[in-house]
Image: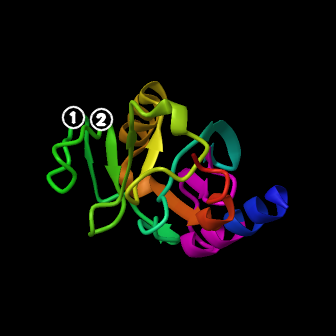
Amino acid sequence: MRAALLAVTLCVAGATLGAGEARAGILIAVDKTTQRMTVTRDGRTLYDWPVSTGMAGYDTPRGTFSPSRMAADYRSREWDDAPMPHAIFFTGRGHAIHGSGHTGRLGTPASHGCVRLAPGKAATLFALVKAEGMGNTRVVIGGDETALAGRAS
């Protein structure tokens, strides 16, 4: 089932890029069902990491996005000045992929809607997106974190 979901996600991402677009690109695919992120460049997998997406009541939006801004050292004004290192923002409402010290919860829905990564992995992803450019990066969020809600602790 995971392979089928990834194939659908990659097809959707490819369709949104346009048939005539030939430039290289980074695809950050997040599967909320498996709580995994796969990072590819030109269709080649570079990374496959556990993440945490939104817990009950705090949805991580599904869809295809382009990063809108990046901040190496950001603190959330909405969530008590919580650190969000190496943040890559992908919605106008403030959703981001970022590092988190709550590594024990990775692999389960645990955030307020952002996509959390281990700090070192967030730094690696941030550097990759910075080098390739936000315009050459797509973020695709698929799946359903409620499928894991019973496993979260």
Q: Secondary structure at mark 1?
A: loop
Magenta region includes residue 22: yes
Image mark count = 2
Q: Is residue 130 left or right of residue 141?
A: left
* Residue on which disc 2 sits: 85
The quadrant in which the N terminus is found is bottom right
Q: Relative to 29, is 37 above or below?
A: above
Mark 2: secondary structure: loop
Q: Residue at x 70, y 43 (%)?
A: 44
Looking at the image, which is closer to me, 64 or 35? 35
Residue 68 lies in the magenta-colored region: no
Q: Name the kind of residue labelled 1 in the image.
A: Asp
Q: Which circle marks residue 143 in the picture?
A: none
Q: Are marks 1 and 2 in contact (CB under 8 Å)?
A: yes
Q: Is residue 114 above or below residue 126?
A: below
Which residue sits at x=36%, y=60%? 90
Quadrant in the rendering for residue 72 = top left
Q: Which is more toward the observer, 93 or 45?
A: 93
Q: Position of residue 30 (x, y in %)?
A: 58, 55
In x, y percent, where is residue 148?
Answer: 66, 58
**Which region shows up in magenta?**
11-39
Residue 119 lies, in percent from the top left, at 41, 28
The image quarter containing residue 82 is: top left
**Nearer-the-camera pick, 1 or 43:** 1
Query: 15 left or right of 24?
Result: right
Depth check, front residue: 130 or 70:
70
Residue placed under numbered mark 1 in the picture? 73
Picture layout, residue 81 above or below residue 1? above
What scheme was used to colour the molecule? rainbow
Give the image location of residue 98, x and y in percent.
Answer: 38, 42
